[in-house]
Amino acid sequence: MSNAVFVPPVPINEPIKSYAPGTPERAALQAEYDRRLKTKIDAPMWIGGKAITTTNVRKMSPPHKHAHNLGNSHHGDAKSVKSAIDAALKAKRAWETMPYEDRAAIFLRAADLLAGPYRAQINAATMLAQGKNAYQAEIDAACELIDFLRFNVSYAHEIYQNQPISSHGVWNRLEYRALEGFVFALSPFNFTAIAGNLPSSCALMGNTVVWKCADTQCYSAQVLMEVFMAAGLPDGVINLIHVSGPVAGDVIFKHKDFAGIHFTGSTDVFRDIWKTIGNNLPLYRSYPRVVGETGGKDFVVAHSSADPKVVATALTRGAFEYQGQKCSAASRAYIPDTIWTQVKKELLADLAEMKMGDPRDFKNFTGAVIDEKSFDKIAGYIDALKKDKKNIQIIAGGKYDKSKGYFIEPTVAVSKDPKSVTMCEEIFGPVLTIHVYSADRWMDTLKLVDSTGEYALTGSVISNDRSAVLQAVDILRHAAGNFYINDKPTGAVVGQQPFGGARGSGTNDKAGSYLNLIRWVSPRTIKETFVPATEHGYPFLG
């Protein structure tokens, strides 16, 4: 044990590379993309540091070119889940007792590996398997994950330094123990950074993890495991499994050593998980930690004082970056009638310039949605919009085609009914519904925004009137966990805008802050008395 108090490097946000024509990062990324496109890989499970292959293999394909085969992912069963739990429990003692600075060093090294030799690899994998363009991949798979790894180390250091006061003759201490048991990390397809952060944040605090990624994220998850192992992560600390959700849940949520779940995904799935955990409470050693970031129906509300171009840009970027496949994506908007004509003009002009296609072509702003299931769901919403001619007018997009890739045009609908289906339900695709309101009903509109739907993840107000901004901040106090003023409701940066929402959007444990990390420890108070009492009596007895 080192006889020193270590201070980790001060984190700074990873600079975002531009990938402009002629830049070295553009050339490197295109070369890696092409190499991977031509190379088939196996994506095994990783249990106890070993690659586990099975006969149950599934083709991995780019969503923009679904006939192409990138390789096969290997899927397991209940035995695989049990093996992963056993591996996590086996590794737990050595990992949780490892000095914090050594655990931290592993993840700091992983960050530098991602910033350097693995940058093109993780970005190309995310472009190919998840359909992100180069810039969206850069800010997600590289920069955000690097930031998570570096800032989490700093936040953990802050937590460990938070100690109680001591009186004369007594030394009081707080020990931040890892949870008793293993943690289950369940990650979505849309952010490689989330897939990396959900297991690693728990592991940093001394926990061992069973990690199930989305089936459509198996390809880039392999790169993440390569990075963790290259950084020196011990065997069994993070165990990656490819199994169905019900199979994983049936084993994990009945295990006595289940200590918590770190989840990002749908609201309905999370509610079912919470219900199952609640029903199984007598089985567990401790009350499990339940941390989840779920759905969103995120809003942009504009005031009559807003600049129409600012509003249009917030809508274009907020709704259609990464095909709207962000839980923070702008999906509903409220525009006053006094500026609507100009907002519409600017919005349609932006959309006319927006190109869609293969992310290999850096001129493309949007690409394909993730898979056929998602395509069919979104297409169903668009078909419903087309049928409701009484209340709905589609002013842009509305077309879709899955013959070669799962392509859906950025679609904008105007709804007379502020409580129509697409104003309320999460779509998770490139569909924006706008309600045009009377400018003299500003306060009523804010109340409408607050009362529409079950979610409270992100939202923004756009206004040049400070009084209107203050009114929005007040009335929409509980409508969004991440609230933006004169900006789009997406793009939270680690260390700057801790991310998470409440209501139907999750537990609001704020990824990218100490608030999330504190959930993965169980503090123990230690009181040491230097000269203990030797008589039972007190002075008042005399």
Image: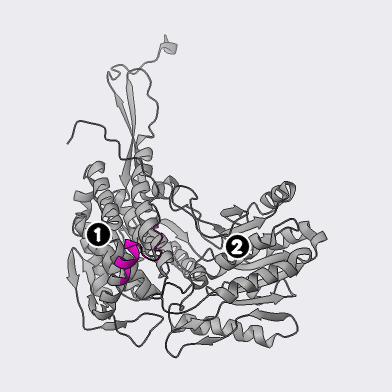
Mark 2: few/some/many CA within 10 Å (<14, 14-19, 20+): many
**Residue 248, percent across and down?**
33, 71
Residue at 46% in and 77% down: 367
- Name the image quarter holding residue 419: bottom right
**Residue 540, percent across and down?**
44, 12
- Name the image quarter holding residue 278: bottom left
Mark 1: few/some/many CA within 10 Å (<14, 14-19, 20+): few
**Residue 264, percent across and down?**
44, 64
User: Which residue occupies the extreme right position in the image?
Assistant: 440
Q: Give the range drawn in magenta.
A: 16-30
Residue at 56% in and 65% down: 318
Of the pair 411 and 180, the residue shown nearer to us:
411
Tell me if residue 196 comes above or below residue 379 in the rendering. above
- Disc 2: which residue: 314
Which scheme is used to colour this image of the protein?
one colour
Q: Earlier in the sequence, mark 2 or mark 1?
A: 1
Residue at 71% in and 47% down: 466
